[in-house]
Amino acid sequence: MTTAIRVMVVDDHPMWREGVSRDLSAAGYDVVATSGEGRQAVRIAAAARPDVVILDLQLPDVSGVEVIHGLQTEVPGVRVLMLSASGEQQDVLDAMKAGATGYLLKSAAQAEFLDAVSRTAAGDTVFTPGLAGLVLGEFRRLATAPPAGPDDAAPKLTERETEVLRLVAKGLSYRQIAERLVLSHRTVQNHVQNTLGKLQLHNRVELTRYALENGLD
Amino acid sequence: MLPVRNSGLEAPLWRAIAVYRIAALAYASGLVIANAGDYARPVWAWPVLAAMAAWTVLTTYGYADPNRRRLPLLVADQLVTMAALTSSLFVVGENELAAGTPTLTVAWHVSPVLCWAVGGGRRAGITAALAMGAVDLIVRAHWDQAAWTGTVLMLLAAIAVGYLVRIAEVAQERLERAIELEAATRERERLARDIHDSVLQVLALVKRRGAGLDGEAGELARLAGEQEAALRTLVAGRQQPVIAGDDLDFMAMLSPYASPEVTVSGPADPVLLPAHAARELLAAVTAALDNVARHCDPGTKVYLFVEDEPGEVVVTVRDDGCGIAPDRLAQAEAQGRLGVAQSIRGRLTDLGGRVRIVSEPGEGTEVEMTLPRTPIS
């Protein structure tokens, strides 16, 4: 038997935290830690070394983006599944760009939630139709926004990637998309993952440029 | 009765008129002293001057009180000033006036005209200026350019001041509206935080824990889920349509439609459309939603997807319901029975856009509405 996947739950609501932990334990996950605050979560994660962090986007102390950066520094390779009780558009997008690997609304059904956790643990990205719309919008914005620097190249989606994301945004499942475009389920998954990868890479380049321009001269 | 006017500029304007009246009184006094030798009855100049000074003091205090800036004081001001002006006939003498000696009031008689303009707006100011101008012309009794110029200047001043007051009122109104909006937004954000921290989480939890249960518990969970979604849209959904010039944020207009059955997706930034186009497009989307509600099973999921391209805005309404066979769709359309599709098509055609409806039995229906952006001219 393989060792259970180590999961950490970060949410400022104790009832929610307990409920989710119970569900995860029942589904065979090893809940190694829980936390109600962002800074504390980063400290605990360094010791608990989770594989997957279930992270509430709105924490009382620090922003989701800061928690994600902290987690990545302390636990390289950690996967973050974000949950939010509300579709805070810009916050969701920022957290995804910062390195979260999946996003789900808190109102998602229990089965949907557990499926998302297992996919996150397997290294897949978890997209909602809403997130696909946000990512498409962000690529569109980057393409039309004036470049930030002389060597700044806005990331671009291939035609296929755009096609896949549009179908995700219209609520089609990966299986339906694969059928419609005559692709394998895996290929659809890869296309979605690539779009997020491009956005996160661009974000890291931007952050480095910002640091060079504002901090190191 | 004069409308009660109120703007931040009101009080300074009344003070400015008081200062003008005092300055005009000082100038008139100077000219009376210089010209008294030429007057027909110089002795009477001093009581008139004293009365003018008293009236100046009285009105300065009177107009300083917002409750007294009413019709009685304005009428009294106009009449007293006219009387002072008319007394020039007796004191200065008709011949001297005709020869060009200034009236006793010189420029002091403009003050009530300005008061009318501030208190009653442009029209009241013009009326007061014409009345005062007529008296001035009759008193001076010579019809040269200088006499006319005085009256015309008074008229122009009344128009300018009346206009200024109106602008100040509009500015004040806008400022008040902006402050109200800001307060409302802040309050809304505070509520959203509180509700997010408590009610939303509990409702979501109830929905989750009870989702697998049968009977009443399952029903309660479903209700909790519905309320959670409704409340989420209410507090954390996008704010009221952002008004940027005459444009509306289409995403903000769509957000109230989000529910457990309806997913809204699109860019994080506002999707701005001219107000008319945005409302028509929203009506088309609503028609598509109604169509789903009418023809598909309850619980059918609907996805609203907005794309903001540089040249056009594309809105897709897709449902995962039963779908329509393509030949049936064409048939119904040919027979003019497809009321909803026609209402959607009609609206989009009026806006210069187009509609594409794709449907397969068992595959749901997809209505894609494309609205070209009119070039910025």
Image: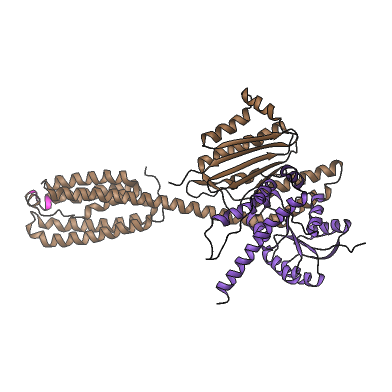
Chain colours: A purple, B brown
- Depth check, front residue: B367 or B235: B367
Q: Quadrant of the N terminus of chain B?
A: top left
State the residue at coordinates (25%, 49%).
B156
State the residue at coordinates (32%, 49%).
B162
Q: Does the stretch in magenta take in B216?
A: no
Magenta: main secondary structure equals helix
* Magenta segment boundaries in residue numbering: B90-94
Residue B363's x, y, as percent? 74, 37
Residue lying at the far right in this picture: please name it: A1
The relative height of residue A177 versus residue A11 in the rendered view (above or below) is: above
- Depth check, front residue: A188 or A122: A188
Residue B269's x, y, as percent? 58, 53
- Depth check, front residue: B235 or A82: A82
Residue B370's x, y, as percent? 57, 40
- Depth check, front residue: A76 or B24: A76
Residue A63 in view in this figure: no
